[in-house]
Image (cartoon, helix red, strand yellow):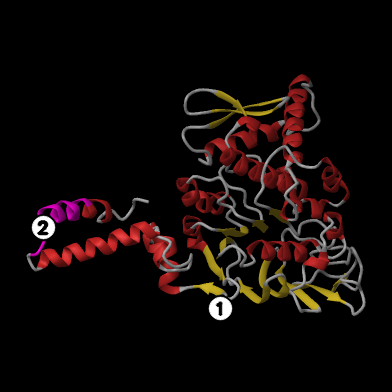
Amino acid sequence: MYIKNLTIANIRVIEAFEMRFPEPAGWHVIIGDNGAGKSSLIRAIALGLIGPHEVKAARPVFADWLRQGATEGKVKLVVIKDTDYDGHKGQKRPTKQDITAEITLQRADGSGGLVEVKGNDNTKPSPAEHIWSDARGWFSAGFGPFRRFTGGTKDWDRVYLSSPRCGAHLSVFGEDVALTEALMWLQELDYRRLKSQEVSNSTSPNEGQLATELQAFINETGLLSHGTHFEAMTADGPTFRDGNGNVVPVTQLSDGFRSILSLTFELIRQLVRTYRQEEVFPLGGARATINLPGVVLIDEIDAHLHPTWQTRIGEWFTRCFPQMQFIVTTHSPLVCRGATKGSIWRLAAPGSGQKSGEVTGTEKHRLILGNILDAYGTELFGQDVARSAEATRQVQEMAQLSAKKSVGKLGPGEAQRLIGLRNVFTTDDPTEY
């Protein structure tokens, strides 16, 4: 499935916002100042994807969701069904039309702040054909900014079994959620691999093969930087060999590596759960791509990533998951460079007087194709962010000294000062940042 249209009204600081995706598969980036509502937007989309019934497992406090002064909020998704993968139940003929998933949040008078959440599925938790059904397909997953293998509250572990659709988005709703299930799954893969080697007459020809396919996928697609590669799968989890030749357990890698690897492993685990191993890694198929549809939400994708990794992370995801619709938030213009196939959207800061909406035309091209100063020059990331206040003062000083030089009134000490300032602030290199 893919999101075709998204409409949100009166959710936290967002009064009204609409997104349209004429070409859903790709890298769709949401930018905005702190407090503009990026995380609220991701949570609202996750709510629409999970549905009003199963989302209760995430224990969201909906009384805090409504915009101040509003008594009703809405999240509406128009979803394109993938006829090859999204299933249905019952005897009715499958629909070919778009499917609407709409959730209304209402605060009744005298309710003491309580908010009622309703969906447009006629209150049925498993309608015959809907994104909230438990039919095969309808894939979506969501990831919050705190992506890690360990350190979360253990109480959340049961949600992955009792409410799997909610579990696939769980870290979006809380900072105390770790992607522990991904690590346990990797350990189980190693056990299955060893077991398959012991049993020569295994009834399943793919038994244990998934661990090998996953390792090859990470190594052959160029995800990791500085020569780091996936060394081995062990009973304690995967190990990696860094550029210096050191073997490091996955839990001891840097924050950037753990952030991306936990996300990637959990995404593939969820894909295997939904589509089965044979469709994620087909026998004889290309290891460099996973050609399956769905929606993936990632809040603050740039968290802990070096600028070089921020620059190429969108290209990696869209190349390796070419049929997936990624909707990500970021504070970094470098992340926008992956939107060659996709779109860029801006949430205006409260009180700024600006309008939220899609970034198009020259501004979009600067973010995708320009250097880092071109990106900051659009003012989409705020005004005067390319230089500090002191740097701005020195640039003004350089301009004044240049003006004095042009009329022949520059003293000896000022001439040396001008040379020094020009060495600092003048560059013809369009790639340095």
Mark 1 closeness class: few <14, some 14–19, many ≥20 residues within 10 Å: few
As drawn, the label of residue 273 is none
Residue at horizontal 62 percent and vertical 48 percent from the top: 290
Q: Is residue 405 left or right of residue 310?
A: left
Instruction: Please give the range of residues in magenta.
Output: 409-420
Q: Earlier in the sequence, mark 1 or mark 2?
A: 1
- Residue 94 picture location, percent across and down: 81, 69
Q: Is residue 411 magenta?
A: yes
User: Can residue 98 be spotted in the picture?
Assistant: no
Look at label 1 and name its amino acid. Answer: Lys
Q: Quadrant of residue 191?
A: top right
Q: Between 381 and 301, which is closer to the camera in this rendering?
A: 381
- Residue 310 picture location, percent across and down: 50, 50
Instruction: Give the distance between the C-alpha atoms of the residues marked 1 and 2, in whole angstroms.
Output: 49 Å
Q: Which residue is mark 1?
A: 355
Q: Is residue 100 left or right of residue 39?
A: right
